[in-house]
Amino acid sequence: MNPDKNFNDAADRYATSPSIENSIALAQEFFNKGLFTEARDLYLSCLKGIHTDDPVIIVGLIRCEFELKNFEEVKARLDKLIEKKPDYKNQEAHLLYARALESLHDTDSAQHEYETLHGYFSGPDASFYFAKFLKSTKQTDKAISIFQHILDTAKRSSKFYNTNHQEIIRQTRVELKH
C-alpha cells in the first residue's frame, strides 16, 4: 500500500512531459493532497492557447480558488465561463458558485442559486449547503425540513449511496442536533 502512488506517478509523468494532460493530472493530485496553491498554479499554467477557455481546467482552478477562499475570483471565473460557454453545465461548479455568493454575502443571489441546485443536483451536497444557508438566514423550519429529507433519502438508499455520501449524512445529523 503506497498512499502516494498516484501523486508520484503523476509527478513522474509531468517531469517527463509537462503536457496539458500531465499538468492537469498533477494539479488534481496536488488538490487531493490539500496543496491548493500548487494545484492552482498548475491549472493557471494550462490556461493558454487553445486551452484558454477549457471548462475542465477552469473548474479545476475554481475548486482551488474556493479552497483558498478567493471567492471573488471564483465568482469572476464562473461568470466568465458562463459567458464564454453558455451550454456548459457542471453541477459541482454551480454549487461552488452558490457557496461563493453566500461567502460574498450576496444573499439573494445565493438563495436563488441554491434553490436551482436543490432541484437538480445528484446527491445530497447541494441540499445540505442550501439547508445550512437557510439556517444561517433564520429560515429554520425550511432548513430542518431539508436536513430531514437528506436523512430520509439516506435511509431509503443503497449502501453505495450511503458510503459515497457518508460525510454529508454525518454532518446533516450534526446540524439537526443543533
Image (cartoon, rainbow, N blue to C red):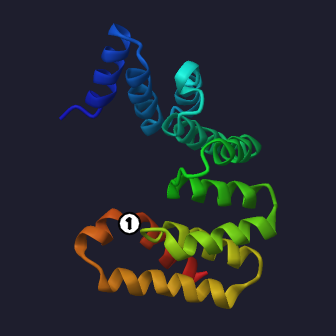
**Above-or-below relation of 16 to 145:** above
Q: At 73% from the left edge and 40% from the top edge, which residue is drawn?
A: 73
Looking at this view, name the residue that lies furthest to the left: 1
Q: Position of residue 103 (x, y in %)?
A: 74, 56
- Outermost residue on the top side: it is 16
Could you say where residue 156 lies in the image, as x and y percent from the top left? 31, 86
Q: Quadrant of the N terminus?
A: top left
177 left or right, relative to 102: left
Q: Is residue 141 above or below residue 79?
A: below
The spot of residue 169 in percent (x, y) is 43, 72
Give amino acid for label 1.
His
* Depth order, front residue of 69/119: 119
The image quadrant of residue 58 is top right
Q: Secondary structure at mark 1?
A: loop
Dividing the image into 4 quarters, which one contains the C terminus?
Answer: bottom right
Q: At x 42% / y 64%, what residue is drawn?
A: 167
Where is residue 100, by image quadrant? bottom right
At 77% across and 65% down in the image, what residue appears?
109
20 with respect to 110 (left or right): left
Q: Which residue is mark 1?
A: 165
